Amino acid sequence: MSDIIINAENLKKTYKTGMVEVRALVGVNFKVKRKEFTAVAGPSGSGKTTLLNLISGLDTPTSGSVQLNEKEISRMSGAELGDFRRDHIGFIFQSYNLIPVLTVTENIEYIMLLQGVEKKERHRRVIKILNEVGLEGMENRKPIELSGGQQQRVAIARAIVSRPDIILADEPTANLDSKTGSDLLEIMQKLNEKWGMTFVFSTHDHMIMDHAKRLVSIHDGRIEKDEIR
C-alpha cells in the first residue's frame, strides 16, 4: 500500500454565474501522506474549501485528477462515488450536520449501519468513541439537548468511528468559542497520534494552523507555501 493517500494533480475548478467565470483553483498539485495532520489555510475565497470538496468527491474538477488510495475518484459518479466516500472518508463540517431526530448513539452509528456493521460491533465502537471524545452518559440525548461543542464532538465521533482512511474537516472550529475549539483540537490531535488517523483541515483559525504538522497556504486558487513543521 502506498504511503500517499491523496494525490491531486493539476486541479482546476471554474464556476460560472451567467457570463461571469470564477477560477476557484488554478492548477493545484496536492499530495497527502498517511498519518498527516495538515491544515490548508487561506482567506475567504482563496480556494481552500473548494480543494477539500474536490479531494473528497463532493465536487468535480473542471480538469485534473484526484486519487484516493490510488483509485481515481474525480471520474466516479453516482452510487459508486457515494459508496467510496462512505467507506473511505470521514467528514467534519462547521455546521455539525447531525440528524436532529436521532440520538447521539444513532448519529454516530449511522455510517456503520450503511456499511452493514453488526449491532454488537456498532455498540462496542460507540462506547469506545464516546469515551475518547468525552461524551460518556450522553448516549440518548438529541442534538438539540447538546451545546455546540458537544454537537461537534458527536460529529467528530461519527467521522472517525467507521475507521475511514482520511478525515476532512472544513472549518471545524468556526462556530465555537476558543476554549471549546482548543479542547476539540486536542481530541483530534490525540486521535492522530494514538490511532494514526489522517486529518486534513480547511481553516483560517490560527489555533489549528499553529498545531498543524503541515501547513499549506493557498491564495487566489494557488498553493503559495507548503511547510512541514
Image (cartoon, rainbow, N blue to C red):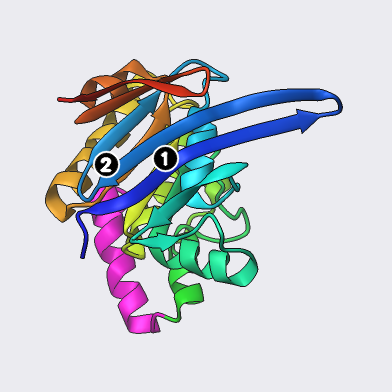
Residue where numbered disc 1 is placed: 169
In primary-sequence order, the first of circles 2 and 1 is: 1
Would you place residue 117 above or below residue 185 in this image? below
Q: Nearer the viewer, residue 74 or 104?
A: 74
Say the numbered circle drawn on residue 30.
Answer: none
Q: Amino acid at mark 1?
A: Ala
Q: Quadrant of the N terminus?
A: bottom left
Q: Amino acid at mark 2?
A: Met
- Alpha carbon of mark 2 to alpha carbon of mark 1: how far? 10 Å
**Dividing the picture into quarters, in which one does residue 184 lie?**
top left
The residue at the point 46 percent across, 57 percent down is 104
Classify 10 Å Cα crowding around label 2: few (below 14), some (14-19), many (20 and above).
many
* Relative side of 35 to 181, left or right: left
Q: Secondary structure at mark 1?
A: strand
The residue at the point 14 percent across, 45 percent down is 193
Residue where numbered disc 2 is placed: 188
State if disc 1 and disc 2 touch (CB < 8 Å): yes
Q: Secondary structure at mark 2?
A: helix
Q: Is residue 217 magenta?
A: no
Classify 10 Å Cα crowding around label 1: few (below 14), some (14-19), many (20 and above).
many
Q: Nearer the viewer, residue 225 or 9?
A: 9
Magenta segment range? 117-139
Would you place residue 204 above or below residue 58 in this image? above
| Image spot of residue 53 (x, y percent) | 53, 42
Would you place residue 48 above or below residue 147 in this image? above
* Relative side of 42 to 75, left or right: left
| Image spot of residue 16 (x, y percent) | 76, 31
Q: Quadrant of the C terminus?
A: top left
Principal secondary structure, stretch drawn in magenta: helix
The residue at the point 38 percent across, 57 percent down is 68
